[in-house]
Image: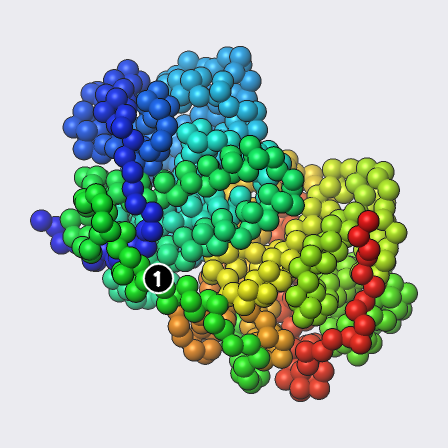
Amino acid sequence: MTQQPFELPHFYMPYPARLNPHVDEARAHSTAWAREMGMLEGSGIWEQSDLDAHDYGLLCAYTHPDCDGPALSLITDWYVWVFFFDDHFLEIFKRTQDRAGGKAYLDRLPLFMPMDPSTPMPEPQNPVEAGLADLWTRTVPSMSAGWRRRFAVATEHLLNESLWELSNINEGRIANPVEYIEMRRKVGGAPWSAGLVEYATAEVPAAVAGSRPLRVLMETFSDAVHLRNDLFSYQREVEDEGELSNGVLVLETFFDCTTQEAADTVNDVLTSRLHQFEHTAFTEVPALALENGLTPDEVTAVATYTQGLQDWQSGGHEWHMRSSRYMNARARPTKPWQGPTGPGIAACDVGALLASAGAERLRAYTHVPYQKVGPSLLPDFHMPFQVELSPHLAEARPRLTEWAHRMGILEEGVWDEDKLAACDLPLCAAGLDPDATPEALDLSSQWLAWGTYGDDYYPLVFGHRRDLAAARLTTRRLSDCMPVDGEETVVPANGMERGLVDLWRRTTAEMTPDQRRTLKGAVDVMTESWVWELSNQLQNRIPDPVDYLEMRRSTFGSDLTLSLCRMGHGPAVPPEVYRSGPVRSLENAAIDYACLLNDVFSYQKEIEYEGEIHNAILVVQNFFGIDYPTALGVVHDLMTQRMQQFEHVAEHELPIVYDDFGLSEKSREVMRSYVSDLRNWMAGILNWHREVDRYKADYLARRAHGFLPERPPALPLVG
């Protein structure tokens, strides 16, 4: 017997698996269906024995325990199809390194998922196309148009991001942890599985389908499913198939540790994601229902869907413990709860759950704020790009002070001229866009000042008073300060509202409604993320690492600041190029570098003087139980790898995107200019952090004390 590369860890799984009584019906149906679609004898991929050994009927019976027989059979057919696709793509294109053939193969598959069921499909050319055509036709009539769009997008991500995996194999490149989590959600298919959970349980209401709580439920579900699969499939994928997209291998490489250490760390991340799922379900989802006025039936639908995701977690684990597809011979035995016994029931041991997960969960809530940490330690940052500054910088500084006075921002007790000068936001704007006109530089400086002021305002005004309701009201009013298509603007009640009304009017004067909608969305995402920070602050809860990194992009105002660096550049490129995986990967790598950079510089300011919990170094310290210098090393390594990823995407992946979309030379030049903007953005932000007083120890000792204004700034009245 081949030696296992590591011992499977003890999995956190608080929900016992349940088996659907229609399991045999689903097995028989899926076998007949796979043969009818051409997936078995003669396919060159599977024989009957392969399908029997994998036992997808058992997988679906465990992951969807409550649906009826016909629904379970249809869902099982979907899983047979998706696993056949995975093996088919591996054999035909990954093993042969045929990217061009793989792309042509993938480009045809969306033709078999038309939004209008009456749209004719092409003639299937292989079992994957035949299976998809049949499944789509059988599934979509009973689902809404909104579900069809979501499920089609999830399916296309699942299919198309296989090219990302193939490209990484071609280059022998192992992803960094953040890149891997993002891509694994698309490649791994758990968002696709969440769509089938809706089919089996209840559709989520359209009004909240895109909300943060529902998105987090789906993403934490996805991450836990994928990381669990990575642990069970490491031996097959990495040692047999030469696969590089495996979380254990990613962490093994990033931390330069043993395979066993990496596997244990993957399990720690998996556990943390399940804790985040539970936290979101118990705290954010109920608030979402109240805020959106969901009907009792809609509340029930969300609850049923959430239960369905839990069932999938426990059932998926049980199947991994039984399927011949995975390494499960020496899963760690534990004492089960009273009740059924079997291979996977061991995951339900209460004592082991408390021992393995309780300490980590408790640690997230027991941070002592305002600990003295001393001046922020600054590593040797990897920055391959030179900073350039606008020649209009000196003139912009006094104009920003005048604007801040005129808006009332310096009269509310949160900021004064000294604090504004310590931020020196025109210096940041001058680096973001060194070619800006004086007018454009002023506008950029004012946007940066407004966003930074808001970021300081929320915790000081609402956090110290523990007034989440007022924060939510303020956030809604700020959104109303940005009319998209002629709506009436609110009368501003304070400096923050007055500043936003002024910036919005001047920035959007020549914009189309769609452009205004995009910019408004960027501002809304930022202000809503400040409320998320407040909620954690009131609970004294250090965030889960993945949730923190993804929300940090919002709290930093990344979408807004990136739009500022693009200001004046008309998009001469098809929108689908900007939505492509490599371009989003490029942007997120740049954003993460800047966010982590800010956390490194602001560590003393936030931890010692502000009692803050939203800092990547603190999140890493809490998660791993390590000290400040060691956590800084982890964050610095991640920053470096995100910058290296940015360089890799720009050099190797974007040219392929240009070819795939057949971009003209003019469009390619626009994209090259955009990459240059992002380089300026990162270099300018690093230069700004190095130069300003805001993060320096001597300035912090003089000014950065937690204080409340004698009276709160003018708050809007309810009514």
Which residue occupies 55% across, 18% down?
116
Where is residue 357? Give x, y as percent. Answer: 35, 62
Residue 465 placement: quadrant: bottom right
Which residue occupies 54% across, 81% down?
371
Relative to 259, is 44 above or below? above
Instruction: Judge left or right: residue 103 versus residue 336.
Output: right
Q: Nearer the viewer, residue 357 or 330?
A: 357
Residue 594 placement: quadrant: bottom right
Q: Mark 1: which amino acid?
A: Ala
Where is residue 49? Give x, y as percent. Answer: 16, 28
Q: Residue furthest left?
A: 1
Is residue 145 in view?
A: yes
Residue tagged by mark 1? 357
**Local secondary structure at mark 1:** helix
Q: Nearer the viewer, residue 415 or 512?
A: 415
Where is residue 175? Give x, y as percent. Answer: 41, 54
Instruction: Judge left or right: residue 485 versus residue 581.
Output: right
Is residue 395 in view?
A: no
Model colouring: rainbow
